[in-house]
Amino acid sequence: MQQDTLQILTILLSGAAVASAVFALYNWVASNAAVKKRFTQIVRRDRVPADLSLSGTASARKVAPVIDILSKLSLPEKGWENSGARLRFLQAGIRSKIAPQYYYAAKSLLALVAPAVLVLFFYFAKPQISFHLAFFFVVLTAAACYYLPEFLLRYITQKRIERMRNGLPDMIDLMVICTEAGMGLDAAIARISGEMVRTNPDLAQEFYLSLLEMRAGATRVEALRSLALRSQLEDMDDLVTMLAQADKFGTGPAESLRIQSDMMRSRRAQRAEELAAKIPVKMLLPLGLFLFPTLMLVLLGPAIIQIIETFSNKPVP
């Protein structure tokens, strides 16, 4: 009777842990999607609806105390908002204020509940396992679950960087057209932010944020350097350096932007050629594991059967 009760508690605890983790991740993604939707509407100069508030949902208010307690278990020390931890969220395109709390709450929840479920599993399903081996698996599970959200955040950041890298030459071409048409650099940034919001919303948001920083009082060079820091692109660093020199010496940026666009396109073509050159090396392992053994079996199979028949002096069934 006691064992049945413990099994029922294990099932309930596992279900509650999975539901809590899914709910935390859902609120994190939903809050970030709301921020992106609001930002896209601002860039398009539309009126922002009043029901897109990040804290307007009743469910978010109910779980806020629990999320706050769980996030404090793995949240960095005071002052993390100005540290590299905050920068990682900006580089991933996550600007919601409550997203870091859900992120660290998910880390704490996974690191605490997953080992507890594994301990209960060993207790009921594998009671003969040694203590040292069980302890090793529990510690390994806790470490893997704790760092799983970091791997997810890194993956999101890399995909976003790749999208911005591929779309940057097209945005520079639009900037060249705007500057040659007589627009200033600030007006060109505002125009291309609205034009690129559908094709490449990540770049459009970053450039529009730089424009807002300039309108708030920051210098053009400071806003562009913040843009390069958030985007984490080498091409963006070169672009910002070129624009800073053009702003310092008072030269027209149109010709410099055209040259920079050609260089970025050349780099994009070189990256494509590099990926194409890596294909034979990447195909070597699946060919060696799957294709070559099958081919050798088809070619040498009849000969092996004949050799066996010859040396055994009897037909092989």
Image (cartoon, rainbow, N blue to C red):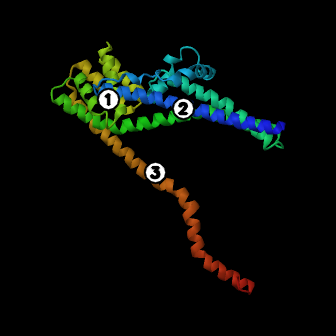
Q: In which quarter of the image is residue 17?
A: top right
1 and 3 marks in contact (CB < 8 Å): no
Mark 3, residue position: 278
Q: Nearer the viewer, mark 2 or mark 3?
A: 2
Name the residue: 39% across, 44% down.
Answer: 271
- Packing grade of label 2 (10 A; few <14, some 14-19, many >=20) is some
Query: Marks 2 and 1, Cα distance to the nearest angstrom?
Result: 36 Å
- Packing grade of label 3 (10 A; few <14, some 14-19, many >=20) is few
Mark 2, residue position: 25
Query: Marks 1 and 3, Cα distance to the nearest angstrom?
Result: 29 Å
Q: Which of marks 2 and 3 is nearer the N terminus?
A: 2
Query: Marks 2 and 3, Cα distance to the nearest angstrom?
Result: 36 Å
Q: Which of marks 2 and 1 is nearer the N terminus?
A: 2
Q: Nearer the viewer, residue 66 or 59?
A: 59
Determine the secondary structure under disc 2. Answer: helix
Q: In which quarter of the image is residue 251?
A: top left
Amino acid bearing label 3? Lys
Q: Single out the residue that lies furthest toward the top.
A: 217
